[in-house]
C-alpha cells in the first residue's frame, strides 16, 4: 500500500469514528433544572469573608489544607484569586459604593449550570449534569483535551499541569456524594453567618425574590443565576449591580446553543483533532523517511 493511501485511510478512519461519536452526543437535550434540582443561594451581603467555606471544601475533597486559623488571614483579599486544581472555591472582596470603608465578599466556585457548556464541549462524556443539580466529572473517561476549560463561561475548570502522568480536570463537584447521603455541601454546612442557603432551587428562587422585595434598599433587584446561560444551580444576591462584582455579564441563552452548531459542523466534515494529529504524525514519519532516503543516496553517491 502506498503511503499516500495510508494517510487517507488513517485520517478518514479516525474522523469517521469520532464524528459518529460526537454527533451522537447532542447536549441540546441536557437535563434542565427541575423541581427536585438542588441549589445554593449565596447572599453576598451576609458573607463576612471568614473563608471557612474554603477550609471545609479542602477538607471534604481531600485537597491540600491548612489549619482553620490560617484562613483568618485577610491579606489574601489584596489580590484577586480564582479556583485552581487544589482549591475548588475561593472568596474574594469587592466594593460597595454605599459602604466604601466596608468591603463585601463573594464566594466563587463552579456554578453547576442547567445546560453546562463544559459537558457540551466534552468529547467523551467525562462531564455530565445530574438530575439533582451537580455537574460531575469522571476522570476515567477524560482524555485531557481541556475543551471544557475553554467552553466554560465562568472560567472554572482547572487542570493538573503538575501531574505529568494522570492529570485531571479539577473543579467543585457540588459535594455530589454528600448530597446522595442527604447531607449539605461542606461549604454550606460550615458557613457561620448563613450566607449560604442550600435547598431545592425552586424554593431558593422564591426565598431570594421575597428577600429582595422585603429589603429593596439592601439588595440589587436581580438574582444572578436565575436566567444567566439558561440558569445555574448557584444563585447570587448582592447589594450592587453584578457588573461591579467578578461575576460575568451573560445572556440567558445557554452557551451550548452557540457552541454546538460550530463544534458539530467541524466534526461533520471530518476534521476532529485526533484525525488531524494522525495525519500530522504520519506526515512527519513520511518526511523523516524521505530525509533518510535522500541522505543514504547522498552517501552512496
Image (cartoon, rainbow, N blue to C red):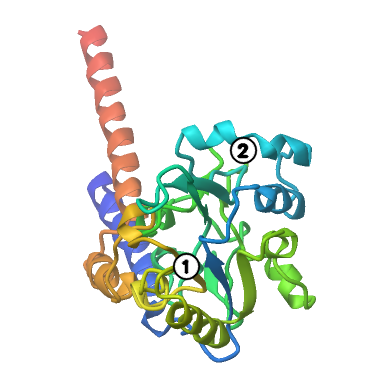
Front position in the image: 116 or 12 = 116
Nearest to viewer (mark 1 / mark 2): 1
Task: Characterize the local packing of mark 2: few (<14), some (14-19) or many (20 or more) Cα atoms within 10 angstroms.
Answer: few
Quarter of the figure that contains the C terminus: top left
Q: Which residue is mark 2?
A: 165
In the image: residue 97, left or right of residue 181: left
**Looking at the image, is 92 positioned above or below residue 140?**
above
Q: Position of residue 19 (x, y in %)?
A: 34, 69
**Looking at the image, is 52 positioned above or below residue 73?**
below
Seen at 55% across and 48% down, the residue is 91
Find residue 147 and report its image quarter.
Answer: bottom left
| Residue 26 showing in the rendered view | no
* Marks 1 and 2, how far apart at CA: 38 Å
**Looking at the image, is 204 positioned above or below residue 108?**
below
Secondary structure state at the residue bearing disc 2: loop
Seen at 40% across and 70% down, the residue is 217
Q: Position of residue 80 (x, y in %)?
A: 45, 39
| Residue 284 showing in the rendered view | yes
Front position in the image: 221 or 2 = 221
Along the polypeptide, which appears first: circle 1 or circle 2?
2
Secondary structure state at the residue bearing disc 1: strand
Front position in the image: 273 or 289 = 273
Q: State the mark number for residue 194.
A: none
In the image: residue 181, left or right of residue 295: right
Seen at 54% across and 66% down, the residue is 42
In the image: residue 236, left or right of residue 163: left
Q: Which residue is mark 1?
A: 236
Amino acid at each position: 500500500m502506498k503511503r499516500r493511501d495510508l494517510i487517507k485511510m488513517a485520517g478518514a478512519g479516525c474522523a469517521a469514528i469520532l464524528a459518529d461519536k460526537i454527533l451522537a452526543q447532542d447536549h441540546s437535550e441536557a437535563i434542565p433544572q427541575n423541581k427536585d434540582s438542588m441549589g445554593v443561594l449565596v447572599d453576598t451581603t451576609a458573607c463576612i469573608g471568614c473563608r471557612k467555606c474554603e477550609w471545609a471544601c479542602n477538607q471534604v475533597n481531600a485537597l491540600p489544607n491548612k489549619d482553620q486559623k490560617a484562613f483568618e488571614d485577610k491579606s489574601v483579599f489584596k489580590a484577586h484569586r480564582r479556583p485552581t486544581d487544589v482549591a475548588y472555591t475561593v472568596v474574594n472582596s469587592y466594593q460597595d459604593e454605599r459602604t466604601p470603608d466596608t468591603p463585601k465578599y463573594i464566594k466563587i466556585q463552579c456554578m453547576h449550570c442547567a445546560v453546562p457548556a463544559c459537558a457540551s464541549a466534552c468529547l467523551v462524556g467525562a462531564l455530565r449534569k445530574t438530575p439533582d443539580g451537580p455537574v460531575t466529572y469522571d476522570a476515567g473517561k477524560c482524555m485531557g483535551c481541556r475543551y471544557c476549560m475553554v467552553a466554560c463561561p465562568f472560567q472554572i475548570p482547572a487542570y493538573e499541569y503538575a501531574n505529568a502522568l494522570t492529570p485531571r480536570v479539577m473543579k467543585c463537584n457540588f459535594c455530589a456524594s454528600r448530597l446522595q447521603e442527604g447531607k449539605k455541601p461542606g461549604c454550606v454546612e460550615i458557613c457561620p453567618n448563613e450566607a449560604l442557603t442550600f435547598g431545592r432551587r425552586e424554593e431558593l428562587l422564591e426565598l431570594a425574590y421575597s428577600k429582595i422585595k422585603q429589603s429593596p434598599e439592601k439588595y440589587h433587584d436581580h438574582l444572578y443565576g436565575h436566567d444567566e446561560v439558561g440558569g445555574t444551580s448557584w444563585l447570587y444576591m448582592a447589594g450592587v449591580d453584578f457588573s461591579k462584582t467578578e461575576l460575568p455579564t451573560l445572556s440567558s441563552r445557554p452557551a451550548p446553543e452557540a457552541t454546538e452548531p460550530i463544534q458539530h459542523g467541524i466534526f461533520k466534515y471530518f476534521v476532529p483533532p485526533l484525525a488531524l494529529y494522525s495525519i500530522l504524525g504520519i506526515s512527519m514519519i513520511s518526511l523523516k523517511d524521505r530525509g533518510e532516503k535522500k541522505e543514504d543516496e547522498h552517501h552512496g553517491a
